[in-house]
Image (tube, coloured by chain):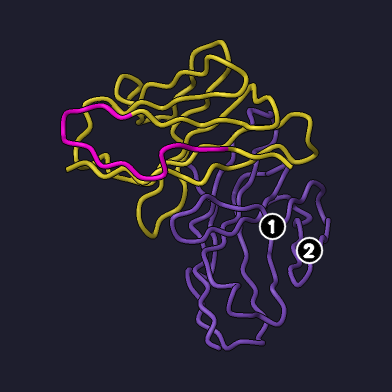
Chain colours: A yellow, B purple
Amino acid sequence: GAVVSQHPSRVICKSGTSVKIECRSLDFQATTMFWYRQFPKQSLMLMATSNEGSKATYEQGVEKDKFLINHASLTLSTLTVTSAHPEDSSFYICSARNNRASYGYTFGSGTRLTVV
Amino acid sequence: GQQLNQSPQSMFIQEGEDVSMNCTSSSIFNTWLWYKQDPGEGPVLLIALYKAGELTSNGRLTAQFGITRKDSFLNISASIPSDVGIYFCAGQLFPGNTGKLIFGQGTTLQVKP
């Protein structure tokens, strides 16, 4: 079945530094990947849609210069949180769209980011 | 951002009881999905619904896509302790197919053995 690997699962960084999160589709090609953010006891909020070979589409209110997305290949999208601050601490989840499957969305296991 | 209205927000039930939760929206969706999320993990798909009126089962789980395309429910029969978790509905907007999913607020389920 479709598997999406997200790395790292947990990361702690100092305020002002940048953190990169990787999302890989292991057994299928994903032309589209999605990045979500989830605060404790809340739902998943879509941050951006990542398209292979083109610029990401950001949701309203999401700073594109702060949350850099790169989708350089059909199996890898990265989210870089630049100049992280404590309020960026959250659970970040990616999903990949498998166009060959009857149901297209597979989620990664998430990354817990803590900025200290 | 846009969200679906999911209820109830939380449930605390006895093992063996049936559970029902639902989602409604003012927008029409062409796909409804139900997920379960365990703490510290990503959502896992339970049931996918593609047609208005569709009723689909997956073991003890049953979900339906509302006729109006604006609502869906999920039933869990004979609950067991491992059903504990957060359940989310998600919809893909219609018309258009940008691929984006909109999530409900989640229903936290606790099962007492």
Whether residue A74 is situated above or below residue B70 in the rendered picture:
above
> Residue A20 lies in magenta, yes or no?
no
Toward which corner of the image does residue B83 lie, by quadrant? bottom right
Q: Position of residue B10 (x, y in %)?
A: 48, 72
Q: Read off the residue under disc 1.
A: B46
Toward which corner of the image does residue B18 lie, by quadrant? bottom right
Q: Are marks 1 and 2 in contact (CB under 8 Å)?
A: yes
Amino acid type at mark 2:
Asn
Q: Residues within 10 Å of mark 1 (few under 14, many from 20)?
A: some
Q: Is residue B38 left or right of residue A26?
A: left
Image: magenta residue range: A5-19
Q: Residue lying farthest top?
A: A53
Q: Is residue A104 left or right of residue A34?
A: right
Amino acid type at mark 1:
Leu
Q: CA distance from mark 1 to mark 2?
A: 7 Å
> Residue A10 lies in magenta, yes or no?
yes
Q: Residues within 10 Å of mark 2 (few under 14, many from 20)?
A: few
Q: Read off the residue under disc 2.
A: B58
User: Considering depth in this image, is B47 or A107 the residue closer to the camera?
Assistant: A107
Q: What residue lies at 78% left-to-right and 63% top-to-bottom?
A: B58
